[in-house]
């Protein structure tokens, strides 16, 4: 057995467990006496605790008033420095200065009262109600709840809300080049370590590629892969990505060749996908523009004059090119009657041929048929 310093038992000097049962009387029912003494002790404990809570409340309120008074004092002193002086403002300044001094004194007074209250509490003897406290009153199983799968509409709404709030921060992260800068920025903005940031970085890349800003696209693509690797690491470790991004930077800064090659390979694949998506978007946009232009030039019958012109016989096309009505009539007269009606109808519906004022389509057809009958 060690002969060194013994165990210090002074921590138990003030334990007083049997205060409810020490005194009995033959003239009073013992259980009733125990309950009465226990109730009186609980009331004393409650009063002591309430006094401490009142002191905390009072000092908190006093500090709030002090902050407000100091704010007013600062404003008055700034106006005084700017040269705005008058008797009323000087009087107000002195009043606020006095109020600040009084509140500071009150705060110190409350702090002393709280310290004294705490010392008094430490001196109180332990009893059956204070010697131990219940740690918890229910069992809690540390089981991670199964997350509810989000619908596509919910995911889209979540993404849009996040991007609207943090677009500027995400763009700033996308322009960083050094590992240390990226790690520090994510440490200062851990909310950016998420799927929404990775997705928005890819959107930015596509926009840069469409604008033919290829160097910027490659820079932001690099940061998109950084974020994707962090998210993949979190899925592998089954932890929140905000808690493991430092592990990724520690690993990538001292990465062996296979890990660095895997990173570079994923970066190249992303660039190729971005170029492909940008090309598809540009083609889709061009088609939409062409369709809008086509709708704008549709004739009264809903036909496209460009398409109708391309389908006309060469002689009729030539008459339109030269704007020669006589040549047009001669060219139509050489066609089969049904074919002539077909082309004439299409020219009118597309707006290539506009009937003279007061004439309708039937008049045009009848005139054409009469010309055919005369030739026969």
Image: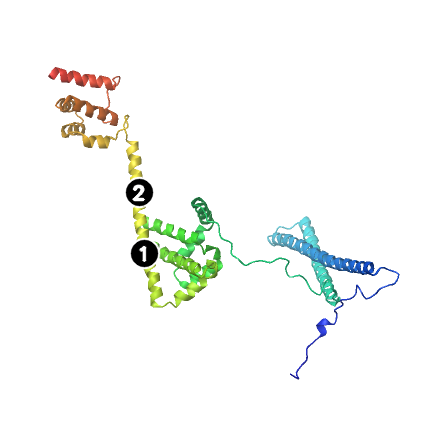
In the image: residue 202, left or right of residue 103 = left
Name the residue rendered at 36%, 68% in the picture.
Answer: 256
**The disc label shown at residue 269, or none:** 1
Q: Looking at the rendering, which quadrant does residue 157 occupy?
A: top left
Find residue 262 and report its horizontal and vertical position in percent.
Answer: 34, 62
Q: Classify mark 1: helix, strand or loop.
A: helix
Q: Classify mark 2: helix, strand or loop.
A: helix
Name the residue rendered at 34%, 58% in the picture.
Answer: 267
Asked if residue 130 is positioned above or below residue 61 in the image, the reply reads below
Q: From where the camera sits, is residue 213 visible?
A: no
Q: Circle 2 sits on which residue? A: 284
Label 1 Cα neighbours within 10 Å, binned few <14 / some 14-19 / many ≥20:
few
Q: From where the camera sits, is residue 10 visible?
A: yes
Name the residue rendered at 41%, 63% in the picture.
Answer: 179
Q: CA distance from mark 2 to mark 1?
A: 23 Å
Label 2 Cα neighbours within 10 Å, binned few <14 / some 14-19 / many ≥20:
few
Find residue 315 and report its horizontal and vertical position in percent.
Answer: 14, 28
The residue lying furthest to the right in this view is 27
Asked if residue 118 is positioned above or below residue 98 in the image, the reply reads below
Quadrant containing the C terminus is: top left
Eye-nearest disc, 2 or 1:
1
For the residue pair 305 and 47, the one nearer the viewer reads as 47
């Amino acid at each position: 057995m060690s002969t060194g310093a013994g165990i210090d038992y002074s921590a138990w000097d003030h334990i007083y467990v049997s205060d409810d049962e020490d005194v009995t009387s033959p003239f009073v029912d013992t259980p009733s006496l125990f309950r009465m003494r226990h109730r009186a002790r609980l009331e004393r404990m409650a009063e002591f605790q309430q006094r401490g809570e009142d002191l905390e409340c009072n000092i908190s309120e006093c500090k709030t008033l002090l902050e407000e008074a100091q704010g007013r004092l600062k404003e008055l002193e700034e106006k005084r420095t700017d040269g705005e002086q008058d008797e009323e403002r000087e009087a107000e300044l002195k009043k606020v200065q006095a109020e600040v001094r009084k509140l500071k004194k009150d705060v110190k007074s409350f702090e002393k009262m709280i310290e004294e209250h705490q010392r008094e509490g430490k001196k109180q003897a332990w009893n059956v109600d204070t010697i131990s406290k219940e740690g918890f009153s229910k069992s809690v199983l540390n089981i991670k709840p199964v997350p509810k799968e989000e619908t596509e509409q919910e995911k889209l709404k979540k993404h849009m809300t996040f991007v609207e709030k943090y677009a500027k921060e995400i763009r700033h992260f996308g322009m960083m080049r050094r590992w240390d800068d990226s790690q520090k920025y994510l440490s200062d903005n851990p909310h950016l370590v998420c799927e929404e940031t990775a997705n928005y970085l890819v959107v930015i890349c596509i926009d840069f590629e469409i604008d033919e800003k290829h160097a910027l696209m490659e820079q932001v693509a690099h940061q998109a892969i950084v974020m994707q690797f962090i998210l993949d690491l979190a899925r592998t470790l089954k932890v929140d990505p905000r808690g493991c991004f430092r592990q990724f930077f520690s690993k990538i800064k001292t990465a062996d060749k296979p890990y660095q090659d895997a990173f570079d390979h994923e970066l190249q694949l992303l660039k190729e996908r971005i170029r492909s998506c940008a090309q598809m978007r540009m083609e889709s946009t061009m088609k939409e523009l062409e369709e809008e232009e086509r709708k704008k030039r549709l004739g009264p019958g809903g036909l496209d004059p460009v398409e109708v012109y391309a389908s006309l016989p060469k002689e009729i096309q030539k008459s339109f090119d030269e704007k020669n009505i006589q040549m047009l009539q001669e060219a139509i007269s050489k066609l089969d009657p049904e074919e002539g009606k077909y082309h004439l109808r299409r020219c009118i519906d597309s707006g290539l041929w506009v009937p003279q004022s007061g004439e309708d389509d039937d008049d045009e057809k009848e005139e054409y048929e009469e010309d055919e009958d005369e030739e026969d």
